[in-house]
Amino acid sequence: MFGTIRGISVAVFCVSVAVGVLGCNVEGRWSTTPGVSAASSARLVRTDEGIDISTADTQEVDLVEAVVAHRRQYLHTLRQLHDYYEAHGYTAKQQWATFELQGMDRVQKFRYLLDAEVASDALRPEKQIDEADALYEKGLELMRRGGHGVPGIYRQDRMIEAADLFRRLIERYPSSDKIDDAAFFCGEIHKEYLPGQESIAVKWYERAYTWDPGTPHPARFQAAVIYDYRMHDRNRALELYQAAVKHESAYKSNVRFAARRIRGLTGGGHTLATP
């Protein structure tokens, strides 16, 4: 019996390590968007430095789907283990399982296929929904507690939890008037607090102003800065600086900066690529 229990413990440990390494996309709401095919996901994000984020082939899609399925099974089994310990009065082990379950919210989850990282661009903010508002406020509070706005001092786990809440808001309440706000702050989190995730950040900023062209947030400007300085896509940056000047005039310092960059990009012989 001891050998069996030890075998189970080793198996659980191995699964735990594997999930941690893979990024812990552990719940159904984080699964790959249904219907995403290799063809629809094979989108490239290239920079002057040769960065290429794409779907290589159908093998990648198959592997991502397998990872999602295993994550879901892992979480389901861990919850069963937690309930088993609770039912049998194994308090210490129940606490271990509870701690591990709570840790799932503090680990960033990836969907790996760029099209599946953000919600559809067809959503529109239509109405006030109390439950969505509550999730939004909780997400903002997590960001504040995590150090948002304090240069160099922040808690990445709090930011990941906040992004989880914003995405949950969008997925559960896609007609909420807070979806553009949630998308903007998802962009902020991926831009400022999660290194190397510029391609995800710009997608969220783009959703914010696509869903609501009148969004009160400087989403166009923030996306322009990423394209300009991090992804070195100056054509796209120029388009977005121009859009920021037109649509985000309330942010005076951003507009002044954007105007300088437009002069710099165009005055130096830089021209927009032909569509």
Image (cartoon, rainbow, N blue to C red):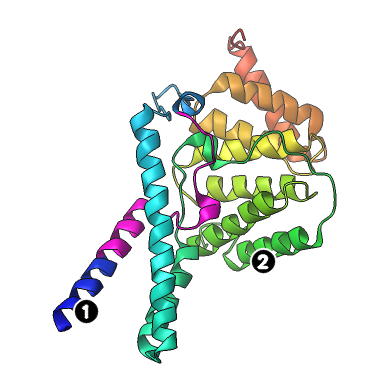
Q: Quadrant location of the C terminus?
A: top right
Position of 31 relative to 72 (above/below): above
Instruction: Give the class, few, some or many, for how many residues have Cα within 10 Å of label 1's Cα (few <14, many ≥20).
Output: few
Q: Residue at x 67, y 34 (%)?
A: 121
Q: Nearer the viewer, residue 184 or 73?
A: 73
Q: Which residues are magenta?
A: 14-37
Position of 189 relative to 75 (above/below): above
Residue 150 in picture, x, y percent from top left: 59, 60
Label of residue 5 in the image: 1
Mark 2–mark 1 distance (CA, rounded to whole Å): 42 Å
For mark 2, what is the residue? 141
Position of 218 relative to 224 (above/below): below
Residue 251 seen in render: yes
Q: Residue at x 33, y 32 (%)?
A: 59
Q: Earlier in the sequence, mark 2 or mark 1?
A: 1
Label of residue 77 in the image: none
Q: Let me know if residue 230 is in the magenta part.
A: no
Q: Residue at x 56, y 28 (%)?
A: 228
User: Nearer the observer, disc 2 or disc 1?
Assistant: 1
> Can you tell which quarter of the image residue 13 is in?
bottom left
Residue 261 in picture, x, y percent from top left: 64, 25
Instruction: Give the class, few, some or many, for how many residues have Cα within 10 Å of label 2's Cα (few <14, many ≥20).
Output: some
| Three-letter code, disc 1 | Ile
Check whether the beta carbons of the residues at disc 2 and disc 1 lie within 8 A of each other: no
Q: Nearer the viewer, residue 178 or 198?
A: 178
Label 2 residue SS: helix
- Answer with left or right where residue 14 lies relative to residue 64: left
Q: Quadrant location of the N terminus?
A: bottom left
Label 1 residue SS: helix
Residue 100 seen in render: no
